[in-house]
Every structure is written in structure tokens, then in C-alpha cells.
Amino acid sequence: MRALPALILGAAGIWLGQTYLNPYYLRLVDVVGINIILAVSLNLTNGMTGVFSLGHIAFMAVGAYSAALLTLPLPRKELILPDLFGWLRQTQIGLLPATLAGGVLAALCAALIGYSVLQLRGHYLAVATLGFLVIVRSVLVNWERVTRGGVGISGIPPYTTTWWTYGFAAACIYLSWRLTQSAFGRAMLAVREDESAAAAMGIPAAATRLISFVLGAFFAGTAGSLWAHLITVISPNSFWLVETFNLVVMIVVGGLGSTTGAVVGAIVLTLIPEALRSLEGGIEVVGITLPPLFGLSQLILAVMLILTMMLRPRGLVGGWEARWPRLPRLRQVRAARGANG
């Protein structure tokens, strides 16, 4: 009930957006929603448990490719993937089961590698997760029978809508928010602050880190599926170091460890580069036409990031968490009316 006003406002906003926004701005809204899923899911791992992962985009790639293979029309599969496995070549399902399947497969990958990788700490862990990203990219490039190699998969059905995007984003935010209010969420924060002290208090630190890693990977896989069915073309270059860097910057700028910060960081780091991109094509200032300045948006963004880290080292929201509006309970309202006669 406490989340009901936010859900109503969100649904009204989506309806207004679909009614009045042109396709460009509507797609930008969808990209913001997918980045929110990625940032909040990475915050579950990096921000709340202190597992500094650089392999989150790899889970997104697993979800994107697996969901795309499950939703491609059968004639399209016969045309571009003639050597695909028989059962997979004859399978075509809808967006929701394919997205869930992509999320589950990404979570399974996280469980498999997390058991050994999460034994590491600090920059060793970061390098190990980066190694997983390299492995996934190598598989995507070389397993041409399934992934078409560097060419990638095109013609993916454009199933992703704003409702699907923000439905999964709401589920991811709600889970993250509920975790911060739960005993398990406090255990995650304890592991992040001091793993030895948390273990001494009886908190299973290794299991806590692994569960947060798997949860983050699941939502990264769903984001990958939504991305694939929004852009309709995926390739190994879609999931590489630039995307990894941008994702880490989102949660650091927003505020590490804060769900609200992850949402704010995703919105800011999606919209500002898009707004600055128009500068690269050349603009007119007080009657003077400036020539195209390619790379200017990245330069301005880097300067903004440096200033943000200098002036707001804890991120834009500084660890603050938004609270859901609280509705008065019906029983309390009736009691108040009874007391007033």
C-alpha cells in the first residue's frame, strides 16, 4: 500500500509519455528505464555488499543474446542461423518468458563464477570479474554457430515497450528498497563495512555476497533482453568496456550504496550525454557557427564527473534514500471518524 501512490504516478507518467512524446523521446525514456535497471542491480552488488564487479555488462550480454535467440521468428533463424541447435531453431516464445529466461541464465552464470571469484577481495576481484567480461566477449565473437560472431544478431522483434521497461525497473527498485529495510539488507551493509566483524557476529558473509551477486546478475540479464528488443540489433561491441565504465560511473555519481542514487545517476548519465551530442554537429553561438567538434560531449562529461567527485564525493544524493508516500490505513481513518462523532 505504501508504494501505491508511486505506482499510480508512474503509470500516469507512462500513459502521458506514450500519448504525447514523439518516437525519439519515447525511446530515450525507454533507454533511461533500462539504465535504471542496470544501475540499481549493480548497486545491489557494488554498493550494498561492496563486491566491486566490472563484469556486470557481461550478464547483460548473456540476457540479451539468450532472449534474442528465443524470440527470433523461425524463418529468420533459418536464414541467419542455419547451424543453430535443433531444439533452439524450432523455439519461439514471447518477450516475458524470454526475458525471465535471460535473467535466470545470467543468474546461473553469476552463481557458477561467483562461488570462486568472490573469494577474492579489492582490485583482485575487480580484475577477475573483468576477466569474465573478456570470456563472454570471446564466446560471442567466436561461437558463430549461435551468435553470428562479430556480425551480431539483427532483426530482433521490437517487443520492448515503456510498460515492460518500467515494469521491470519498478520490480528492481522495489526489491532493492525492500532489501534495505530487511535484516538481509542490513547484513549486506555489514559485510560491505567490515566483513570480518560481520562474520564474527554470525553473518554468513560469503553467502551474502554470492546472493547479492546473483540478484544483480538476474536483473542485468533482464535489462539485456529489454535492450535487445528495443534496439533490435546486438553485437559483441554492444557490451564492452565503454558500457562498463558508464555503468560504474552512474552508481558512483549517483551515490554508492543508495537505490535513489543509482536511479538519479542513471537518469543524469543518460540524458546529459544525449543533450551534449548535438554540440558535436556544430552549433551557432551569437551569430558565429562553430565547426563540428567530435568528442566534445565526452570531454564535457569527463569534466563534469571530476567536478562532481571533487564537490560531492559521496555522490549527488549522498546516501539519501527516497521514502514511499504513506497512505493512511483504512482502520485508522474509521477510528478517527468515530472519535470525531
Image (cartoon, rainbow, N blue to C red):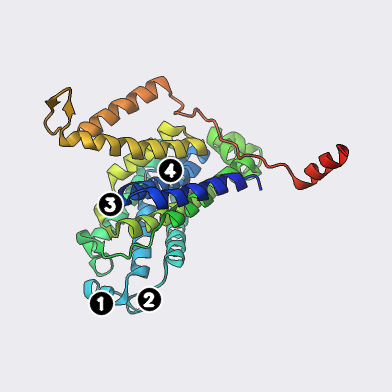
Given the image, on which type of amino acid does mark 4 rest? Answer: Ala
Please, is residue 112 above or below residue 201 in the view? Answer: below
- Image coords of residue 173 (percent x, y): 52, 46
- Amino acid marked by disc 3: Ser
Q: Which residue is mark 3?
A: 238
Q: Residue at x 45, y 59 (%)?
A: 103
Q: Which disc is residue 39 wearing?
A: 4
Residue 326 in percent (x, y) is at 66, 40
At label 2, the amino acid type is Thr
Q: Which mark sits nearer the N-terminus, 4 or 2?
A: 4
Q: In the picture provided, is 153 more to the left or to the right than 97?
A: left
Q: CA distance from mark 3 to mark 1?
A: 24 Å
Q: Is residue 286 above or below residue 90?
A: above
Distance in Å between CA atoms under marks 2 and 3: 25 Å
Mark 3 lies on a secondary structure that is helix
Q: Which residue is mark 1?
A: 78
Picture residue at 42% right of the left edge, 58% below the top: 106
Distance in Å between CA atoms under marks 3 and 4? 17 Å
Q: Residue at x 46, y 55 (%)?
A: 163
The residue identified by callout 2 is 91
Q: Tag 1: residue type? A: Glu
Rendered image quadrant of residue 184:
top right
- Report if residue 124 is visible in the image: no
Q: Is residue 219 left or right of residue 157?
A: right
CB within 8 Å, label 3 to label 4: no
Inter-mark Cα distance, 4 to 2: 31 Å
Q: Earlier in the sequence, mark 4 or mark 1?
A: 4
